[in-house]
């Protein structure tokens, strides 16, 4: 392979690596700007931690389940109102 083709391939490989690395950091940045908010998701629409007898995302069994959380923009959880009161940064007791 001549030097010109090799240089082009190396440049292309470097650009691809940089693009993949940039995309990989976006979710980490977005996650840093989000927080878990318990007790605000509707039945089956939680992001995770839906309590005993459930596995994770989409497994909450009632609306506003206190031990199921949803990711929300940081700083908005406790001002998110539900029919049972505001969201919480930790699991809470909610009526069944």
Image: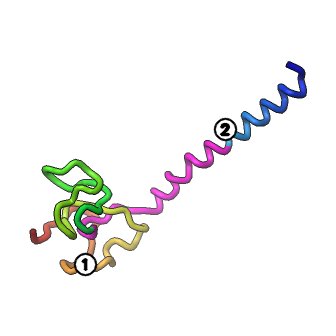
Q: Is residue 2 above or below residue 23?
A: above
Q: Looking at the image, tell me whether mark 2 or mark 1 is earlier in sequence order.
A: 2
Residue 23: say if magenta: yes
Calculate the distance from the C-alpha at mark 2 to the C-alpha at mark 1: 45 Å
The quadrant of the rendering that contains the C terminus is: bottom left
Residue 68 figure quarter: bottom left
The residue under label 1 is: 82
- Is residue 2 magenta-colored? no
Q: Report the residue that reaches farthest toward the top.
A: 1
Residue count near mark 2 (Cα–Cα under 10 Å), binned few <14, some 14–19, many ≥20 = few
Write down the quadrant of residue 37 in the picture: bottom left
**Which residue in the protein does label 2 denote?**
17
Q: Check disc 1 and report its element: helix, strand or loop.
A: strand
User: Which residue is pictured at 19% across the width and 65% down the height?
Assistant: 66
Q: Position of residue 19 (x, y in %)?
A: 66, 45
Location of residue 88 (image quadrant): bottom left
């Amino acid at each position: 392979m001549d030097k010109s083709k090799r240089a082009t391939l190396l440049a292309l490989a470097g650009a691809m690596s940089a693009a993949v690395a940039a995309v990989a950091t976006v979710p980490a940045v977005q996650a840093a700007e989000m927080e878990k908010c318990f007790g605000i998701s509707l039945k089956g629409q939680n992001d995770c931690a839906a309590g005993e007898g459930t596995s994770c995302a989409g497994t909450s069994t009632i609306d506003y389940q206190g031990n199921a959380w949803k990711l929300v923009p940081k700083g908005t959880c406790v001002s998110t109102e539900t029919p049972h009161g505001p969201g919480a940064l930790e699991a809470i007791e909610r009526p069944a």
